[in-house]
Image (cartoon, rainbow, N blue to C red):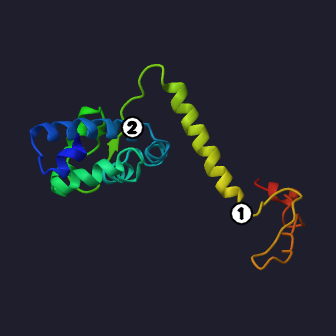
Amino acid sequence: EMTLAIENNQWERRQQMIGTSVLLHAVKDAARSARLQRLSDARGGVARSEIMDWIKDSERYSKWLDQLLTKMEFKSYQSNVSKALLKADYVRTGTTGRHVKWTLPPVPEGMEAIQDDIRRLSQEQDGEEEEAAPAEAGGEDRKSDDGEDAPEPAKGGADDEPSDDDDDDE
């Protein structure tokens, strides 16, 4: 219906209301995403712009957003996102300014296990990306950037062992 209204230049209150409803679903889905969960855990919240980026990058909402922005000023869209965040139970951590963060809404009852699984899978995926680099431990062959064998790091030595002389605190 949104596509048809935009193509026929019939953007009316009904389409605005549909857009508001879709935006509410978008910010709720964003709160469930592993990407924003990680950011929120690391930083104690997420910025509105990070939520908007998630919506723009999502497969489900990107086309809708492109259509919406042909009929709505970007500042109005930002304002609508803020209103949707409040309706979706995000909590604002500051009053004004560009450094305001939003804490994600609480996980609905019964969904905690799913959220834990999402975080675990996300961390595992991050670990796989890091494993693409040469391993630092273990008996695996070490290669330098040019493909040649890299020297093994020095192991142990007289300076690495604690000595009995260090106990002279008396």
Number of the label disc, if any, that sits on residue 91: none
The relative height of residue 160 versus residue 30 in the rendered view (above or below) is: below
Q: Quadrant of residue 134?
A: bottom right
Question: Who's the residue at 39% across and 29% down the image?
Answer: 106
Left or right, residue 83 beside residue 116: left
Instruction: Determine if residue 42 is in view.
Output: yes
Number of the label disc, if any, that sits on residue 133: 1
Q: Helix, strand, or loop for circle 2? A: helix
Label 1: how many Cα within 10 Å (few below 14, some 14–19, many 20+): few
Q: Helix, strand, or loop for circle 1? A: loop
Left or right, residue 120 beside residue 104: right
**Quadrant location of the N terminus in the rendered image:** top left
**Mark 1–mark 2 distance (CA, rounded to whole Å):** 32 Å
Question: Who's the residue at 86% across and 75% down the image?
Answer: 149
Front residue of this view, candidates 79 and 161: 79
Q: Amino acid at mark 1?
A: Ala
Q: Quadrant of residue 140?
A: bottom right
Q: Amino acid at mark 2?
A: Asp
Left or right, residue 140 beside residue 31: right
Please name the residue that numbered disc 2 is placed on: 29
Front residue of this view, candidates 16 and 140: 16
Residue 110's x, y, as percent? 48, 19
Question: Who's the residue at 58% across and 44% down the image?
Answer: 122
Label 2: how many Cα within 10 Å (few below 14, some 14–19, many 20+): some
Q: Earlier in the sequence, mark 1 or mark 2?
A: 2
Instruction: Determine if residue 100 is in view.
Output: no
The relative height of residue 153 versus residue 78 in the rendered view (above or below) is: below
Residue 19's x, y, as percent? 21, 41
Residue 90's x, y, as percent? 31, 36
